[in-house]
């Protein structure tokens, strides 16, 4: 298929030279008139797959999207690129909606964004039926499937709505997270021939995955933010209480942070989200209520302070880092105890038994992800049914220290627990190993044990940490309430017999994400910030970080050179070229 016309729109309106391979395949299906399904990772470039056809088709492209809070920004961004678009959702009053509908009938717009809830209304479907709709793009299409992690009942109205449209528009479904089961469900409900499914894979080459186990959450986050000063990111926690606590922690350390969870007033929530989108705050601390489609492109890190309930949810939330393609990080801070919170959520939910069992299994997978010693990226891809090589970038691929073998130490500790006949807690175990001499040891004749003092020279504190590690790893079990006693587990017994080797990762040090930004980049960022405030749009609507970085490299000072910058089309050149080139010229002159 000839994509020349599409290529022209790509250059003129979006400022890009080439399609990504996945976009090319999707466009071929869409322009051939097929119903199709695009599965691409976050940041893969799904939006262009319907925005470009919208410019090429005669009629209107309707985009169904659950991201009401973002519609205005998306529409602003399109208008800014010279593509006439509008939206209709619950934030508008009737007169305004009527006005937009008549403008649509006049042919003033190429794209219309609507919330799925609209499709429940017969009146609205009637209004749509009067429009020349060519294409219906269904964003976040996994919401249609009950097997997905984000099922939305209003999506079920989609197929009925399509049947009622006299133009019988073709359908393009898009999602970043679909297991095979979910993909089948989407195709079936939206009448997409599975042959027209384009799946570019789930790998995110610019996203480095890290799991950090059993480290102090607050310390880690504060260290991370200190090392990565000025970088923007999201910190997820499972409960509102923890979100509030972490937000306080950060603000008390003079970090510009705000909270987002369902318990906040709508107004506060809106304001915090806007502050984040507009780069007025650096860190958003949030529950999973935040982020469905936060397409702020310059999120550099996503830290999960607590483990989420499924790998789908984890990867989707983690994937909000690095949509602009620049190196970014997704870090999971794992404490086995946090699994209990998710367990509780599942226990409390109103799922039927089948779904409940599935939810427990998904949580189990999440826990395996946190505990695997294999490539993290590979683990996730395999979960989505995709084979791959080790990524070479994640914390497991990078962790050459993981070969540290502590089997001998483990055996000493475990045998001491056996000698103590599981009657004591970790304090006494550590004292016996270290060869301490106190009243309790003497009263119980513990110095007569063969394991007494076999780890003399190691501090009791280090020994306690080692015991905690063996407990977390399941080699030891702490049983009982306030003063638990230690017991050797079946796996611990295997260690004693020499059948299992014990490895331990040392504390992970925090590393800086990317080289320090240079001065020009900061100046361009300031220009972008001012323009954004002036026009009441988020900064990334004007230019992505990637475009600013490209300006720093190319240093364009005339229109032709400026047009070669990724993300600069004619419309952006006209609007912003002068302002940015003025700064670049001044820098060249220095
Ligand atoms: P998705 O919806 O799949 O998460 P987007 O459509 O938001 O991704 O695109 C992610 C980023 O990639 C955006 O900053 C977009 O401008 C950029 N992008 C999309 N297509 C291309 C392309 N062909 N060349 C360069 N950049 C692109
Ligand atoms: Zn890896």
Image (cartoon, rainbow, N blue to C red):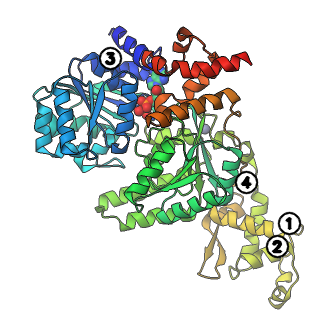
Element on which disc 1 rests: loop
Element on which disc 2 rests: helix
At label 2, counting other C-alpha atoms closer than 10 Å, the crowd grade (few under 14, some 14-19, many 20 or more) is many
Question: Does residue 43 appear in the picture of this structure?
Answer: no
Q: Which residue is mark 2?
A: 433
For the residues marked 2 and 1, what is the alpha-carbon distance in whole angstroms? Answer: 9 Å
Residue 101 x/y as whole percent = 18, 33
Nearer mark to the viewer, of 1 and 3:
3
For the residues marked 4 and 1, what is the alpha-carbon distance in whole angstroms? Answer: 18 Å
* Front-lying residue, 590 or 407: 590
* Front-lying residue, 582 or 17: 582
Element on which disc 4 rests: loop
From this view, report whether residue 131 is shown above or below residue 3: below
Q: Quadrant of residue 115?
A: top left
**Is tag 2's residue or tag 1's residue first in the polypeptide sequence?**
2
At label 3, counting other C-alpha atoms closer than 10 Å, the crowd grade (few under 14, some 14-19, many 20 or more) is some
Asked whether the residues under the numbered discs 2 and 1 touch, taking CB atoms below 8 Å apart as contact, a structural biologist would say: yes
Q: Which mark is residue 507?
A: 4
Q: Which residue is mark 3?
A: 28
**Is tag 1's residue or tag 3's residue first in the polypeptide sequence?**
3
Residue at horizontal 59 percent and vertical 18 percent from the top: 581
For the residues marked 4 and 3, what is the alpha-carbon distance in whole angstroms? Answer: 49 Å
Question: Does residue 422 appear in the picture of this structure?
Answer: yes
Q: Which residue is mark 1?
A: 458
For the residues marked 1 and 3, what is the alpha-carbon distance in whole angstroms? Answer: 66 Å
């Amino acid at each position: 298929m000839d994509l020349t016309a599409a290529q022209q729109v790509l250059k003129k309106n979006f400022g890009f030279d080439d399609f990504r391979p996945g976009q090319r395949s999707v466009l071929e299906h869409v322009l051939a008139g097929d119903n199709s399904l695009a599965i691409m990772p976050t940041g893969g470039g799904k939006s262009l797959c319907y925005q470009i056809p919208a410019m090429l088709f005669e009629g209107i492209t309707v985009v169904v999207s659950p991201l009401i809070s973002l519609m205005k920004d998306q529409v602003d961004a399109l208008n800014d690129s010279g593509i006439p678009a509008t939206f209709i959702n619950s934030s508008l009053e009737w007169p305004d909606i009527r006005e937009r509908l008549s403008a649509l009938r006049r042919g003033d717009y190429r794209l219309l964004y609507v919330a799925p809830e609209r499709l429940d209304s017969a009146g609205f479907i009637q209004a749509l039926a009067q429009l020349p709709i060519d294409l219906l793009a269904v964003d976040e299409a996994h919401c249609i499937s009950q097997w997905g992690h984000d099922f939305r009942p209003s999506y079920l109205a989609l197929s009925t709505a399509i049947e009622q449209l006299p133009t019988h528009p073709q359908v393009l479904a898009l999602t970043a997270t679909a297991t095979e089961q979910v993909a089948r469900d989407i195709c079936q409900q939206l009448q997409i021939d599975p042959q027209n499914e384009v799946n570019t894979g789930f790998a995110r080459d610019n996203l480095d995955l890290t799991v950090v186990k059993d480290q102090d959450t607050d310390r880690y986050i504060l260290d991370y933010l200190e090392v990565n000063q000025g970088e923007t990111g999201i910190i997820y926690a499972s409960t509102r209480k923890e979100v509030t606590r972490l937000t306080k922690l950060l603000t008390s350390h003079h970090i510009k942070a705000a909270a987002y969870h369902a318990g906040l007033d709508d107004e506060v929530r809106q304001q915090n989200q806007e502050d984040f989108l507009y780069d007025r705050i650096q860190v958003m601390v949030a529950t999973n209520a935040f982020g469905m489609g936060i397409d702020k492109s310059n999120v550099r890190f996503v830290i999960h302070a607590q483990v989420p309930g499924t790998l789908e949810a984890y990867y989707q939330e983690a994937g909000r880092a690095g949509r602009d393609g620049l190196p970014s990080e997704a870090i999971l801070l794992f404490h086995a105890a946090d699994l209990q919170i998710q367990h509780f959520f599942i226990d409390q939910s109103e799922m039927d038994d089948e779904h409940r069992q599935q939810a427990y299994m998904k949580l189990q997978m999440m826990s395996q992800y946190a505990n695997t010693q294999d490539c993290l990226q590979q683990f996730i891809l395999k979960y989505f049914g995709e084979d791959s090589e080790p990524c070479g970038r994640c914390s497991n691929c990078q962790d050459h220290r993981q070969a540290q073998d502590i089997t001998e130490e483990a055996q000493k500790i475990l045998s001491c627990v056996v000698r103590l006949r599981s009657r004591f807690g970790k304090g006494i175990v550590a004292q016996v190993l270290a060869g301490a001499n106190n009243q309790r040891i003497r009263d119980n004749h513990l110095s007569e044990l063969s394991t007494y003092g076999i780890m003399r020279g190691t501090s009791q504190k280090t020994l306690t940490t080692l015991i905690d590690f063996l407990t977390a790893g399941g080699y030891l079990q702490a049983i009982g309430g306030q003063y638990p006693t230690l017991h050797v587990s079946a796996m611990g017994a295997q260690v004693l017999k020499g059948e299992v080797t014990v490895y331990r990762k040392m504390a992970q040090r925090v590393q800086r994400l990317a080289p320090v930004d240079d001065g020009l980049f900061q100046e361009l960022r300031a220009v972008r910030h001012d323009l954004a405030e002036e026009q009441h749009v988020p900064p990334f609507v004007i230019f992505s970080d990637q475009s600013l970085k490209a300006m720093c490299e190319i240093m364009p000072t005339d229109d032709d050179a400026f047009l070669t910058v990724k993300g600069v089309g004619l419309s952006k050149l006209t609007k912003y070229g002068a302002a940015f080139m003025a700064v670049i010229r001044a820098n060249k002159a220095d």
